[in-house]
Amino acid sequence: MATKTPAEMISALQAGYTFGGSSIALGAAIVAGQVRPEAQVSLPLAMMNRHGLVAGATGTGKTVTLHMIAEQLSTAGVPVFMADIKGDLTGLATAASGSEKLTARTQGIGQQWESKAFPVEFLALGGAGSGVPVRSTITSFGPILLSRVLDLNETQESSMQLIFHYADTKGLELYDLKDLRAVIQFLTSDDGKADLAELGGLSKATAGVILRNLITLDAEGMSEFFGMPEFDTAELLRIAPDGRGVVTCLELPGVQDKPLLFSTFLMWMLADLFRELPEVGDLDKPKLVFFFDEAHLLFTGASKAFLNAITQTVRLIRSKGVGIFFVTQTPKDVPGDVLAQLANRVQHALRAFTPDDAKALKATVSTFPVSDYDLEEVLTSAGIGEAVITVMNENGAPTPVALTRLRAPGSVMGPSSADVVTATIAASSLLPTYGTAVDPVSAYEKLQAPAAVPVPPTGPAVGTPLPPPPPVTLPAPANDGGLAADVIGALGGALGGGVKSMIRSMGTSLGRNLMRDVFGTARRRRR
């Protein structure tokens, strides 16, 4: 319950949300049931890479909140990536029209509203939907992420890693599903019997299960998402000619019925960014902010290796200048190790209609700092477009909890017209590069060709096997609790305990190199 007078609460909020650097304006605080435009609530731009959580029940305004934050990031010159589940975010490409209701709202919170459109890029997984096609090669996607899509158990996941290792060592490029099927079919054939025995941990029965799952995946039309040309995630970091950050929307309405696929694809994009981007430390503004919608889909039923890899990626990617905001219904949807790293919180209303809802409400309240609000009451009575907020200030401490009426976007809150979306895609500079699928010579062609028949040159390399560990001649580096320790912990969980001693003996530099393969992916050239 509140222990301060309204005037004292307003004073505390004003002091808590006054920052020295640039910030993202979120809205005006609500104190004692009234909107207080003199108490503005914001988020320091430099703290966006400390990650965040946007949560709330369906229909409480989460998507509009993402929309509003993305606009301000773009204006500040920060590129944004967003997963657009329902197609509502296409409205960023169209300037909104004002209305009396909108004017009353924006004036009431002290917002100087302006109608604007923003530089937007539309992508679509494998071209399934409205957008430039996004594809990944099988090698790049990696065995752990692919096992997640195939819903393999941990034993089958380990076997998948052996198959990838075999393909790497034999120079068999895995561009698409037919390449992986060809490798497995070869290993389970009479010709591949000796190679299968050499792999040791891969049984013919397990290989058969994986092969059947791949055939099912192909039959469901998912082969379009894998292949060449592979999408370069550096395209997400673009700045428009006018200095605004490009907002990249991955359009997902066409794959709404494949939640495991698109959530894992989002994780591939994050893992790829982590592997490719250099260390930059703390910046005045992030290089990219990545909004991960429907985050619960990523964690439900995930293997221990997968969860370990996610946790370490989130923990370490902020030093690459990337901020991640998970979007879901309640904080309980996110594992504790990940939730602990989400410093910025925007919590929309929750419903408490059932005993499980009541438990989720209490758990949500427990994750906030001590507050002058009765959070259980506030979180069940907040209106659409209102949220309870606390963020990390520039000194690394949490700001006071503030019930906030949020700002309105300057672009359309809802889909743009089909003509606008089509014209935006047609004008995309990415379309000539990624618009048409290609099928270079790879594992399928190599294994189909008779031994005496020369195989044409292969396509661009997408995988390089990790180098064998050198003789142990260096002393083990000290475990200072920093990046080296994180690398050891991540790989120990994702790839097996034996990797820990190898990293310790090989030094921090190679440890960082191996960390780029925490999802089992391999470094490669895209073009």
Image (cartoon, grey):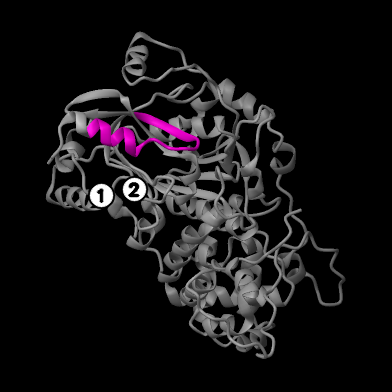
Amino acid of disc 2? Pro
- Magenta segment, which residues? 9-27
Q: Is residue 511 magenta?
A: no
Q: Nearer the viewer, residue 44 or 415?
A: 44
Location of mark 1 (residue) = 369
Indicate whether 158 appears above or below 527: below
Q: Is residue 203 visible?
A: no
How packed mark 2 is, by other alpha carbons closer than 10 Å (few <14, some 14-19, many 20 or more), is some
Query: Disc 2, disc 1: CB below 8 Å?
Result: yes
Q: Position of residue 229 (x, y in %)?
A: 71, 50
Q: Position of residue 479 (x, y in %)?
A: 51, 78
Amino acid of disc 1? Pro
Q: CA distance from mark 2 to mark 1?
A: 8 Å
Q: Nearer the viewer, residue 321 or 8?
A: 8
Give the residue drawn at x 37%, y 12%.
Answer: 103
Give the residue drawn at x 55%, y 68%.
Answer: 518
How packed mark 1 is, by other alpha carbons closer than 10 Å (few <14, some 14-19, many 20 or more), is few
Q: Secondary structure at mark 2?
A: loop
Location of mark 2 (residue) = 398
Instruction: Name the N-terminal-most of marks 2 and 1.
Output: 1
Q: Position of residue 340 (x, y in %)?
A: 35, 58
Specify the farthest residue to the top: 100
Toward which corner of the image does residue 177 lie, by quadrant?
bottom right
Q: Is residue 25 magenta?
A: yes
Indicate whether 185 appears above or below 225: below
